[in-house]
Image (cartoon, grey):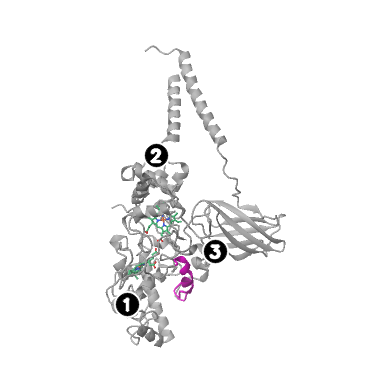
């Protein structure tokens, strides 16, 4: 077979590149048009519903484990950042998509001072979207905060 | 140069198309889930702070002897191994366990139970050692009593007991048969004993449980074909040899972790969430009403051998399972502990009282999702094709121990 003239080879290259660009364009278009993931706030730092408190947590096991009972340390401040040290805190939660609650009854076991509270007995028994609801009662007022966890 | 570049682009294109469309290729999410079910992901065995001897090898060896010792029974004919047969995954293939008489529940297999915070189908005990004491005194199982157990240990195993737990208390003056749960005569004899003697016998009784517990903690789930497959998939390799799955097995795995929703409850390396669910399993005809978990929480809280009790070695703060146990959850009505599915395919019958005879019928149950006899079933019903059913069963069989 005679060697392909340079132009022919370039034409093959160009058409191959064309196909590649088309594939990428379709892929990008599909990515753009695909519904965005649901808008949920999965950060471990949130503002309570009525804006009275800034609420944050850390866990003793990272990442947040499934199938293991673990502890959280919850930090509570005013929106200005002043620690709220004398709050009564109740924890509740569950999986909205499955209609079930938490497998355990977690509780604040220790007030660590400086607006920090140890919560023991946290447990998640499957992966997926969990909602943790924190009810706060302290001098600034009663309020509640929600954390969304994607496990 | 140019043709080679063209070929490279073509190869790249081909690989893109294959990666996107290969029928057996798992997505990143699926791969992550598959790996999460593999035995390689099993966390180290959790400590049991309520049992100082939990990881003591001589205690485990002594526990093994006791597990097979029919001397620990009222008639000298029943041991743990009567129902928990080592060569059958420590269960008996019967719908309900049979000791001195037939019980109301199915004998549970024992591999990997050390990872479970609550024991029994309804979770009415919080440790291996507290659990072991229940069948010993149950009139339908070992039908023994506490002073008889203490006398037996002194006669048959005095030296081994002493080397692990320290000297036995004086027993010669105590009745041959006495205990708080035995016959009326045995109960009366127990009441007639001094508080101090009762306490000393209770300690021997608890230590029998602690040795059995140390042995049971050594019973780990064996590796399966699924584990070999999952390890390869986790590393991005193509499983080969016995690790390779047939197309049917792959389909079953995909269903299991996807559309069939099995993962909601059967998750993690033991394929259980260690929690309790009402799945609408029919009630056992002719047996007393069984409320499952809902009927067990108060009994566990009142058990003198629980983690808070006198014979527990744990400070109360370490009793996590008990401290944060929910007592108010309406979903616990007729809820039972999610069984591990490791080895399940080869140990019919199924469910807490052997109500379902075959895997086919189990899949049928998940498909029909019948109403619960009481409480509310969590199942929503899954539509399976004929091939889907076969595929799920084929997958469950890959969780059997490698022969």
Residue matched to label 2? B24
Confirm whether the magenta stretch covers residue B306.
Answer: yes
Residue drawn at (47%, 53%) of the image: B380
For the residue pair B77 and A78, the one nearer the viewer reads as B77
Which quadrant of the rendered structure holds the N terminus of chain B?
top left
- Highlighted range, magenta: B291-310
Same chain, labels 1 and 3: no
For the residue pair B356 and B143, the one nearer the viewer reads as B356
Crowding near pointer 3: few (<14 within 10 Å), some, many (20+)? many
Among the 4 quarters of the image, the one containing residue B182? bottom left
Same chain, labels 2 and 3: no
Residue matched to label 1? B153
For the residue pair A109 and B264, the one nearer the viewer reads as B264
Question: Taking the image as drawn, is residue B1 in sight?
Answer: no
Are discs 1 and 3 less than 8 Å apart at CB? no
Q: Earlier along the polypeptide chain: callout 1 or callout 2?
A: 2
Residue matched to label 3? A105
Are discs 1 and 2 less than 8 Å apart at CB? no
Residue B289's spot in the image, x, y percent? 42, 69
Task: Please indicate whether residue B8 sits to the left or right of residue B61 in the image.
Answer: right
Crowding near pointer 2: few (<14 within 10 Å), some, many (20+)? few
């Amino acid at each position: 077979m005679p060697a392909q003239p340079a132009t022919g080879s370039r034409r093959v290259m160009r058409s191959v590149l064309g196909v590649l660009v088309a594939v990428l364009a379709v892929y990008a278009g599909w990515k753009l048009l695909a519904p965005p993931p649901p808008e949920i706030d999965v950060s471990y730092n949130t503002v309570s519903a009525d804006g009275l408190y800034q609420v944050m947590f850390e866990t003793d096991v990272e990442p947040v484990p499934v199938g293991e009972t673990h502890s959280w340390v919850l930090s509570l401040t005013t929106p200005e950042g002043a620690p709220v040290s004398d709050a009564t805190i109740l924890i509740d939660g569950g999986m909205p998509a499955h209609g079930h609650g938490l497998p355990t009854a977690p509780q604040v076991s220790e007030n660590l001072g400086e607006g920090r509270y140890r919560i023991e007995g946290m447990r998640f028994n499957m992966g997926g979207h969990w909602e943790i609801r924190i009810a706060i009662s302290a001098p600034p007022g009663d309020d509640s905060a929600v954390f969304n966890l994607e496990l | 140069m140019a043709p080679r570049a063209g070929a490279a682009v073509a190869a790249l294109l081909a690989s893109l198309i294959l990666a996107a469309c290969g029928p057996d290729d798992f997505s990143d999410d699926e791969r992550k889930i598959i790996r999460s079910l593999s035995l390689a992901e099993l966390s180290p065995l959790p400590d049991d702070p309520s049992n100082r001897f939990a990881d003591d090898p001589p205690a485990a060896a002594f526990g093994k002897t006791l597990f097979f010792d029919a001397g620990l029974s009222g008639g000298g004919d029943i041991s743990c191994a009567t129902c928990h047969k080592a060569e059958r995954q420590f269960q008996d293939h019967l719908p309900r366990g049979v000791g001195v008489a037939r019980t109301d529940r199915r004998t549970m297999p024992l591999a990997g139970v050390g990872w479970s915070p609550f024991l029994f189908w309804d979770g009415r005990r919080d440790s291996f050692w507290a659990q072991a004491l229940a069948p010993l005194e149950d009139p339908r199982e070992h039908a023994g009593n506490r002073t008889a157990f203490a006398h037996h240990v002194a006669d048959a195993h005095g030296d081994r007991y002493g080397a692990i737990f320290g000297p036995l208390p004086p027993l010669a003056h105590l009745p041959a048969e006495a205990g708080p749960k035995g016959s009326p005569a045995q109960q009366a004899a127990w009441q007639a004993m001094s508080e101090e003697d009762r306490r000393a016998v209770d300690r021997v009784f608890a230590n029998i449980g602690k040795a059995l517990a140390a042995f049971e903690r050594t019973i780990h789930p064996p590796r399966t074909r699924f584990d070999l497959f999952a390890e390869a998939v986790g590393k991005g390799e193509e499983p080969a040899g016995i690790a390779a799955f047939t197309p049917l097995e792959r389909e079953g795995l995909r269903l299991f972790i996807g559309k069939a929703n099995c993962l909601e409850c059967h998750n993690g390396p033991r394929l259980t969430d260690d929690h309790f669910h009402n799945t609408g399993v029919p009630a056992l005809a002719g047996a007393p009403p069984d409320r499952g978990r809902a009927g067990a929480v108060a009994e566990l809280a009142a058990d003198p051998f629980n983690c808070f009790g006198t014979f527990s070695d744990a400070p109360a703060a370490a009793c996590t399972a008990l401290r944060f146990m929910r007592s108010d959850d309406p979903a616990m009505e007729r809820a039972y502990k999610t069984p591990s599915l490791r080895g399940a395919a080869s140990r019919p019958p199924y469910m807490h009282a052997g109500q379902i005879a075959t895997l086919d019928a189990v899949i049928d149950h998940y498909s029909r999702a019948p109403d619960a006899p009481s409480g509310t079933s969590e199942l929503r019903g899954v539509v399976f094709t004929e091939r889907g059913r076969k595929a799920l069963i084929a997958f469950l069989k890959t969780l059997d121990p490698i022969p």
